[in-house]
Image (cartoon, rainbow, N blue to C red):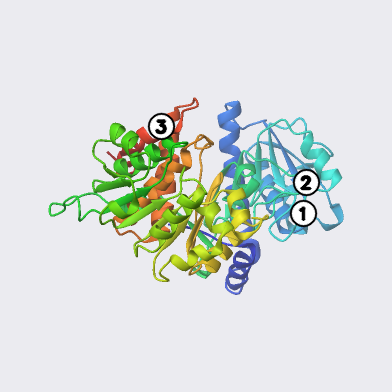
């Protein structure tokens, strides 16, 4: 797992390192990494580096200092570098002196640059770009390399409230910050390059984590020589209705394709589910379904009296539950439904922003804090859907799954995700990790199904085996 740290955590680690290593040394290491990224991008975009033009947008403080030192390194490689000082009286003195010694020039525009380096605002600043900086950014037509974060993006939430930089590449130091993985900032950051500047051992426990492919592969259940359909987990699906039978088909099929265990379906869409998935043991009611190790409840269920009764029965079954869609609406409208739940029963809630608002109030700009708050309130794992999916556990753990695309944003996609989560819960996976791994495979399956063109949720569902093969390196 890769860590994500807040701005305060990174600054605290830097201060500990500064007691052993001069601050100027870390700045030059950071600047050298920025310069190398610029050189690589120049070569990729223009075929070379010598004589190419780079513009620096330089703010006050260390972020501007990083940009100026990077400019000095670039000058020594034969690049023509022009710096625009947005706060000349507060420009980093040592960085500016080094830049001038190397042959860098000062100017008032970066419009003619082949690459622009964004060194306007660092981790300490908040808020959007001021008008003069915003006008300069608006004039940019070249690729942008941001120093630490795109200026104008909140470092700890990824939120934006006005003009900001949209980078092609962001070079950040020590570790990712929340703005690189959640909110609009995750999109504005472009490709994120993390550079080790020697503060890793001084960082506290991460604010959140990202799953790598290996993490998901290690956690995903595959059958062993002594397994059978029962030992691998029996997933129960309580979903769908006469109005929405497709939700039952999608959630059930996802559970079938996720693991090699067994799936039981209970609901009014039994005949339709059985005709599509003959492997399923399908009945009309939860009470007739037989023993399961986890339930998925909610997709297409309906929010009337019948749906309420199904949800209450599932919550009282004493096995882990993934509650999605109509189940969330029911819980938001009638909190007494929580009384049906055994306090020790794990629950995974999977709201999108509007469902979250009904359940726990507006998400607000800090998606990590919102998910963590709701998880503690309901003593449940909360998977907050979005371009970056946030998964919070009641004990405070948070993981983020970053989407590489927006292909999962299609009708029925959430039903597929619920089926994946349910199958992993039935296999005995930790609910927090189950939700994170399911989100990872779900997003990968959407990419594989789309292949560059829109694909419906049924195609996403069909791509689940390919996604699992991919994470296992097969």
Q: At which x and y percent is residue 277? A: 28, 35
Q: Secondary structure at mark 3?
A: helix
Report if residue 174 is visible in the image: no
Report whether 199 appears left or right of 96: left
Determine contact: label 3, label 1, CB under 8 Å. no
- How far apart marks 3 and 2 lie (CA) works out to 38 Å
The residue under label 2 is 162
Determine contact: label 1, label 2, CB under 8 Å. yes
The residue under label 1 is 127
Report whether 297 appears left or right of 231: right
Q: Look at discs 3 and 2 and give the one toward the viewer.
A: 3
Q: Look at discs 3 and 1 and give the one toward the viewer.
A: 3
The residue under label 3 is 458
Mark 1 is surrounded, within 10 Å at the Cα level, by few (under 14), some (14 to 19) or many (20 or more) other residues, namely some
Q: Tag 2 or tag 3, which sits nearer the N-term? A: 2
Q: Is residue 359 above or below residue 354?
A: below
Q: Tag 2 or tag 1, which sits nearer the N-term? A: 1
Q: Secondary structure at mark 1?
A: loop
Q: Residue at x 56, y 46 (%)?
A: 386
Residue 347 quadrant: bottom left
- How far apart marks 3 and 1 lie (CA) works out to 42 Å
Q: Residue at x 53, y 70 (%)?
A: 204
Q: At which x and y percent is residue 267? A: 37, 45
């Amino acid at each position: 797992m890769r860590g994500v740290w807040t701005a305060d955590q990174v600054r605290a680690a830097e201060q500990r390192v500064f007691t052993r290593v001069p601050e100027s040394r870390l700045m030059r290491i950071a600047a050298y990494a920025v310069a190398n990224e610029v050189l690589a991008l120049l070569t990729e975009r223009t075929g070379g580096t010598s004589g190419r033009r780079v513009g620096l947008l330089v703010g006050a403080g260390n972020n501007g200092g990083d940009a100026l030192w990077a400019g000095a390194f670039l000058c020594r490689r034969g690049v023509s570098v022009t710096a625009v000082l947005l706060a000349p009286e507060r420009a980093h003195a040592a960085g500016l002196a080094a830049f001038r010694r190397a042959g860098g020039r000062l100017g008032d525009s970066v419009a003619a640059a082949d690459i622009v380096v964004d060194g306007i605002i660092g981790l300490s600043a908040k808020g959007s770009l001021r008008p003069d900086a915003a006008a300069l950014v608006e004039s940019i037509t070249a690729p942008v390399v941001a120093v630490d974060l795109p200026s104008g993006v909140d470092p700890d939430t990824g939120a934006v409230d006005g003009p900001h930089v949209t980078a092609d590449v962001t070079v950040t130091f020590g570790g990712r910050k929340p703005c690189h993985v959640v909110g609009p900032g995750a999109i504005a950051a472009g490709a994120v390059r993390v550079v080790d500047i020697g503060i890793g051992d001084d960082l506290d426990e991460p604010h959140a984590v990202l799953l790598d492919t290996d993490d998901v592969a290690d956690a995903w259940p595959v059958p062993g020589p002594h397994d059978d359909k029962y030992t691998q987990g029996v997933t129960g699906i309580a979903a769908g209705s006469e109005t929405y039978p497709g939700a039952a088909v999608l959630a059930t099929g996802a559970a079938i394709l996720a693991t090699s265990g067994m799936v039981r379906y209970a609901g009014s869409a039994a005949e339709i589910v059985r005709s599509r998935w003959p492997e399923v043991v399908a009945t009309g009611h939860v009470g007739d379904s037989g023993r399961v190790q986890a339930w998925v409840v909610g997709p297409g269920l309906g929010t009337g009296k019948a749906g309420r009764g199904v949800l209450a029965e599932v919550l009282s079954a004493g096995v882990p539950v993934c509650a999605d869609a109509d189940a969330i609406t029911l819980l938001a409208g009638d909190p007494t439904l929580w009384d049906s739940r055994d306090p020790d029963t794990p629950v995974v809630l999977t709201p999108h922003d509007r469902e979250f608002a009904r359940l726990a109030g507006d998400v607000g700009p800090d998606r990590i804090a919102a998910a963590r708050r709701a998880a503690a309130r309901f003593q449940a794992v909360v998977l907050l859907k979005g371009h970056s999916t946030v998964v919070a556990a009641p004990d405070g753990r948070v993981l983020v799954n970053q989407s590489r695309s927006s292909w999962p944003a299609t009708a029925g996609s959430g039903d597929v995700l619920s089926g994946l989560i349910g199958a992993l819960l039935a296999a005995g996976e930790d609910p927090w990790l189950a939700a994170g791994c399911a989100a990872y495979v779900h997003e990968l399956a959407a990419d594989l199904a789309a292949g560059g063109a829109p694909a419906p949720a049924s195609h996403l569902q069909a791509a689940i085996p390919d996604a699992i093969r991919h994470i296992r390196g097969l």
